[in-house]
Amino acid sequence: MSLNPEDAVRYDVRGDVAVLTIDFPPVNALGFPMREGMVLRLKQAQEDSAVKAIVVIGANDRFVAGADIREFGKPKQGPELLQIQEMMENSEKPVVCAIDGHALGGGLELALAAPFRVAASRAKIGLPEVNLGLLPGGGGTQRTTRIAGPEIALDLILNGKHISAAKGKELGLIDEVTDGPVLDAAIDFARARATEGGPFPKTVERTDKVQNVDPAIFEKERKAGAKKWQGMVAPFKIVDCIEAACTLGPREGLQFEKEAFKVCLEAPSRAAQVHLFFAERQAAKVNDLPADVKPRPIKKVGIIGAGTMGGGIAMSCVNVGLPVVLLEVKQEAIDAGLSKVQQNYDISVKRGSRSQAQVDKAMGLITPTLDYADFRDCDIVIEAVFENMAVKKEIFAKLDEVCKPGAILATNTSALDIDEIASATKRPEDVIGTHFFSPANVMKLLENVRGSKSSPETIATVMAFGKQIGKVPVLAGNCEGFIGNRMLKAYGTESEHLLEQGATPSSIDNALKAFGFPMGIFLMRDMAGLDVGYRMRQGRIEAGTLDPNSPSYTPLADRIVEAGRLGQKTGAGYYKYDGRDATPDPLVEDMLIKIAQDKGITRREISDEEIVDRILGVMVNEGAKILEEGIAQRASDIDVTYAFGYGFPKYRGGPMFWAQQKGLDKVLEIVRTNHAASGDRWKPAKLLEERAAAGQDWDGKPVAAA
Ligand code: 3HC
């Protein structure tokens, strides 16, 4: 947003205290006009003889949310943050930052450079740069370490934690917390400091917490993080900077941090993570909603099915204080479901992530029932039973009878036709898919699936509901598998062909892990269990919709299940298991050799590069078809789906972003080569061909300007 520096930071005087109000919507980021405005207003306050002290506060319900992320990668204009910090640090008049709402990233770093900080009790502070592939580059690694000590700094900065004002005070990052208006408290505080007189503290020069620090704590951190941080730059650099705060002088430490920040800024992982930051926010927006459409309020949720999915969805709701009516068909099933939810909560109490009181409150919000009539006052009812169309239609017909007008009737199906489910009701406009991911209380993605008759209010409501329960909502259209599972199917099939041609489950899984996935596809299948997929395939074979004798049919999964290997739970699947430890099983390779012989395939050595190119290539090609058909609203929604629901490495930005970084022309080459070798499943997406030919990105922008 363009704004005059004078407006981005306003100047008022309250008695003998200057109040500098940062007003740079939406989040008072440290963009050019704000930085320029701060320099201007700090000078004005210094020169104003009526002023004895200075308070800096934010408008827009917050302090400052950090650097202006939109400026990354562009030429920088105007003063640096450092100049503002030095003006506050060297000021002869005491400067107090009044923190309300958020002080994050560069926003907290701005405040930490002032001699004093007063915060409202509801304020949250943190250094979340790591989530953007960055480190706090405005002195945050140095000042936090010097104020709170290296252990606290490591925890806070590596985890990108937001902490409360009270916690901030406990750590020494905040001087005073108030329940009242923060501006009044900060003015009183500033006046008192002016009366006492200077010199005022310079946080960067503190040494008490950085003396005699055992260097082993940094080595331990590097070792512990090595695997988790594979492919990332920022976490390693953060440890280096915090160590530097303990070994270098204040100015050298700041210089060290500046150089490390630059390395992060230029790394491809930074571009990818910033892409995901904006993609996540964009995904919540629905392109074709009329402006006057408002989401309906959701104050009570009904859930059908207290299995793993239903229980997890219930936890997501009660965790944010939403009461849940949880229905099962039998008392034993409801008892088992509730006891599983209780067990999950008990684990979090043991881990210390939740208090017993929080858990008791959450459990108290779940009302178990066997009676559909108890849904009568629910604003949304989510069906989470097994995937059977007839059963689902029966349930929706019942919901139609008992639910109040305007209630959203949602299904957690991961693949079935939303329109057919909706046809069981007389109100298809209120029916929609809300596809959660397992474990639903943990996984962030919520894939909302619009049916052809879902009303704009229904769509707006489930998107808002996703945010309400702390999920990342993405809107998908109705097709088999929607966005996520449709692409999963494409790359699952490709992986199976790779196996027949010479790869092994472990060579594919290892290549995917090296690419950055937390787990390969075959390990994942073994964990989920192989019997459900088997039964689905058998059902389709019996129904005549799947031909097991077709050359494109890949029978390994059937052979594995028919040998009694249902995955981790039976001690064998694609791998053999000792508890949870998987080892490759020569028996599976023998099965593959036999299948290849039967099909007349000569197995060959397949490189990791080919594995990744084919799996990612087929995934992106399917993604392009999904886009072209309007199943996804935008390419970045596909990235959000994969990063938040399917373990795609965030530092790579998602499959569509990966393709763009690699070059759509290069991806098209992979697609065309495989199309020539393998036929239809690699048919190039029109959109991919068009964008590659025009030298454009997915949004149709010229690649050079993207
Ligand atoms: N720069 C530019 N735009 C930003 C921004 C930032 N730092 N933070 C948020 N925005 C934009 C969002 O893109 C969104 O724009 P849109 O309306 O056009 O989609 C708008 O502000 C509102 O953001 P949210 O939808 O996220 O609003 P919420 O109220 O839900 O959340 C927030 C507010 C907690 C501040 C959240 O936006 C957030 O976490 N922001 C990022 C904080 C951060 O990572 N700061 C560190 C930045 S890097 C840095 O400071 C480097 C330094 O060390 C030198």
Image: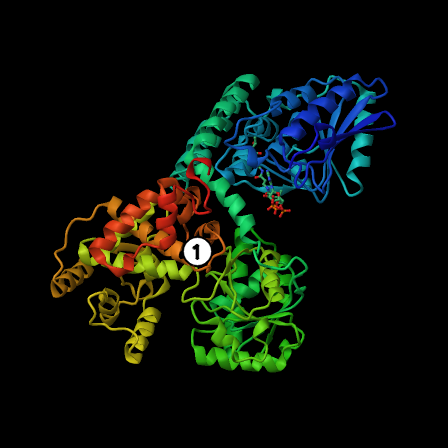
Assign a secondary structure to mark 1: helix
Is residue 222 positioned above or below 358 on the image? Answer: above
Question: Which residue corresponds to mark 1?
Answer: 627
How far across and down, in percent of the image, does residue 620 sit?
36, 51
Q: Left of 245 or right of it: where is 482?
A: left
Camera-nearest residue between 404 and 151: 404
Camera-nearest residue between 676 and 249: 676
Q: Which residue is drawn at 62% across and 81% down?
A: 402
Q: Left of 53 or right of it: where is 697?
A: left
Q: Residue at x 31, y 43 (%)?
A: 666
Quadrant in which ligand 1 is drawn: top right
Which quadrant of the view contains residue 456?
Answer: bottom right
How far across and down, in percent of the image, does residue 464 sit?
61, 58
* Residue type, numbered disc 1: Leu
How far across and down, in percent of the image, does residue 458 sit?
60, 66
Camera-nearest residue between 381 and 315: 381
Q: How crowded is mark 1: few (under 14 residues within 10 Å), some or many (20 or more)?
A: many
Which quadrant of the view contains residue 542?
Answer: bottom left
Q: Report the residue that reaches farthest toward the right.
A: 15
Q: Left of 271 or right of it: where is 524?
A: left
Q: Left of 354 or right of it: where is 54?
A: right
Camera-nearest residue between 653 and 531: 653
Is residue 587 positioned above or below 274 on the image? Answer: below
Is residue 675 positioned above or below 43 on the image? Answer: below
Asked which colour scheme the image uses, the reply is rainbow
